[in-house]
Image (tube, rainbow, N blue to C red):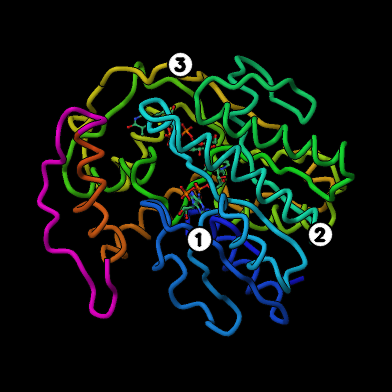
Amino acid sequence: MNVLVTGGAGFIGSSYVRHRLDAHPDFSVRVLDKLTYAGRRENLEGLPAERCELVVADVADRDAVRAALEGCDALVNFAAETHVDRSITAPGEFIQTDVYGTYVLLEAARDAGVRHLQVSTDEVYGSIDEGSFTETSPLDPSSPYSASKAGGDLLVGAFRSTYDADALIVRASNNYGPRQYPEKLIPLCVLNALAGDPLPVYGDGKQVRNWLWVEDFASAIDAVLEFGEPGEVYNVGGPDELPNIEVIQRILELTGRDESLISYVDDRLGHDRRYSLSAAKTEGLGWEAAVRFEDGIERTVEWYRENEWWWKPIRGGEYREYYERQYGAGLLSDTSSASRPGVSG
Ligand code: NAD
Ligand code: DAU
C-alpha cells in the first residue's frame, strides 16, 4: 500500500513514516502536514525523496486533502493539536483540527474508497484508579484536547455506521522517544536537566502514565492497518506504568543531576490521575511491545544528548515564549548558539 500520512512531520507521525519506509521497501509514503510549531521538516530528514513526499497543507483543506489522496491506498491520520496544557488555554484550534479536520479526512477517504486509520489516545477514556481500560470502556474525556480527540473518534464510528466506510481507530498510551517536542514531560525534563534548569512537577507528581516506546507504537499501527477490522478500535498500551516523579528521578540520574532541580508547581486543571490501557486486542493481531521503559528512557536521553542541532533552535524560538506563559518563569540557560551546518531551524 502507498499511504497518505497526515501529521507525518510530528513526533509519532515521523517515526511511523520511517518504520513504514523500512518495512515496505516497494511502497511510498506521502506526508500531508501543516507544519505547525510541532511539525518539523527536519523530522523527515534523511528519508529517500523518491519514496517520501511532503505536501504542506491543512487537513481542514478539502481540496488539498483530496489531491494528496490520489494514488494512495490508505490514510493514517496523526494530524492533531496534541498538548493538553495548550488545549486548556486555547481550545479552538483543537476543535478545528482534531474534530473538523478528521471529518474532512473521513469524507475524502470514503469518497476515494480507501481505508482511514484514525490515531487516537487513551485520554478519551478519562482517568482510571485501578485496572485498565479496554476498547469497550465508555468515553469520558477531561480536557479540551481529549474531548476533541473523542469527537474525532465518534465521527469515525458514525462514518462506519452511516456510510459503511472502511474506518477504524487505534488508541495509544503516552509515547516517548526521539523527536518529541519539548513541551511534553519527558523531553522537557531531559532538556531542562541537561541545561541545569528546574524541572516543573505538577501537583504532587504521583499521577501515573503508561509509557510506550514510539517505535513500538509505529509497528502496532502497521499491524492494525493491515489486519484490523473496519469499525473496530484497537488499544495500544505500553508495558510500564510509572508515577511522574519516578520518571523525573530517572532522568535526573541519567543526566547526572540531583533532586535540587525538582520544582513543584501548580497542578494542571482537570488533571487525570492515572492512565492504563490493555493492549490484549492489538496483541491478538500478532503485535507486541519490544522496548521496556528502563531501556527506552536511556535511549531517549542519549538521543537528545546527541542531537542538539534538533532541539537548540526549538528552545530558542516559539517554545521559549510558550514556556514563559505556561510556567510563569523563563528558561534560565542560554540557548542562542543553535544550529548545525546545512540544517535550518
Ligand atoms: P505532534 O504534536 O508531535 O505532531 C502533530 C503533527 O500534526 C505535527 O506535524 C503538526 O504540524 C501536524 N498538524 C497539526 N495540525 C494540523 C493541521 N491542521 N493540518 C495538518 N497537519 C497538522 O503530535 P504527536 O505526539 O506526534 O501525536 C500524533 C497523533 O497521535 C495525534 O493525533 C495524537 O492525538 C496521537 N497520540 C499521541 C500520543 C503521545 O503520547 N504523543 C499518544 C496517543 C495518541
Ligand atoms: O496519554 C496519551 C497522551 O499523552 C497523548 O494523547 C497526548 O497527545 C500527549 O501529550 C500525552 O498527554 P499527557 O498530558 O499525559 O502528557 P504530558 O507529557 O503533557 O504530561 C505527562 C504527565 O506529566 C502528566 O501527568 C502531566 C505531567 N507534567 C507535564 C508537564 C509538561 C508535569 O508534571 N510537568 C510538566 O511540565
Question: Could you tell which of marks 3 and 1 lies nearer the N-terminus?
Answer: 1
Q: Residues within 10 Å of mark 3 (few under 14, many from 20)?
A: few
Which residue of the protein is positioned furthest toward the bottom in this rendering?
Answer: 50
Question: Could you tell which of marks 3 and 2 lies nearer the N-terminus?
Answer: 2
Q: Assess whether mark 1 and mark 2 are in contact (beta carbons under 8 angstroms).
A: no
Residue type at mark 1 is Ala
Q: According to the image, label 2 marks what residue?
A: 226
Dot 2 lies on which element?
helix
Q: Quadrant of the N terminus?
A: bottom right
The residue positioned 55% from the left and 62% from the top of the image is 32
How far, Cα to Cα, is label 3 from label 1?
A: 33 Å
Within 8 Å: ligand 1 and the Cβ of disc 1? yes
Q: Nearer the viewer's eye, disc 2 or disc 1? A: 1
Residue type at mark 3 is Gly
Q: According to the image, label 1 marks what residue?
A: 57
Q: Quadrant of the C terminus?
A: bottom left
The residue positioned 23% from the left and 29% from the top of the image is 327
Instruction: Using the image as rendered, state which of residue 259 and residue 221 is in the foreground.
Output: 221
Q: Residues within 10 Å of mark 2 (few under 14, many from 20)?
A: few
Q: Quadrant of ligand 2?
A: top left
Q: Main secondary structure of the magenta part?
A: loop
Residue type at mark 2 is Glu
Q: According to the image, label 3 marks what residue?
A: 270
Q: Assess whether mark 2 and mark 3 are in contact (beta carbons under 8 angstroms).
A: no
Q: Residues within 10 Å of mark 1 (few under 14, many from 20)?
A: some
How far, Cα to Cα, is label 3 from label 2?
A: 37 Å
The residue positioned 64% from the left and 16% from the top of the image is 130
The picture places residue 68, in percent across and down from the top left corner, at 63, 67
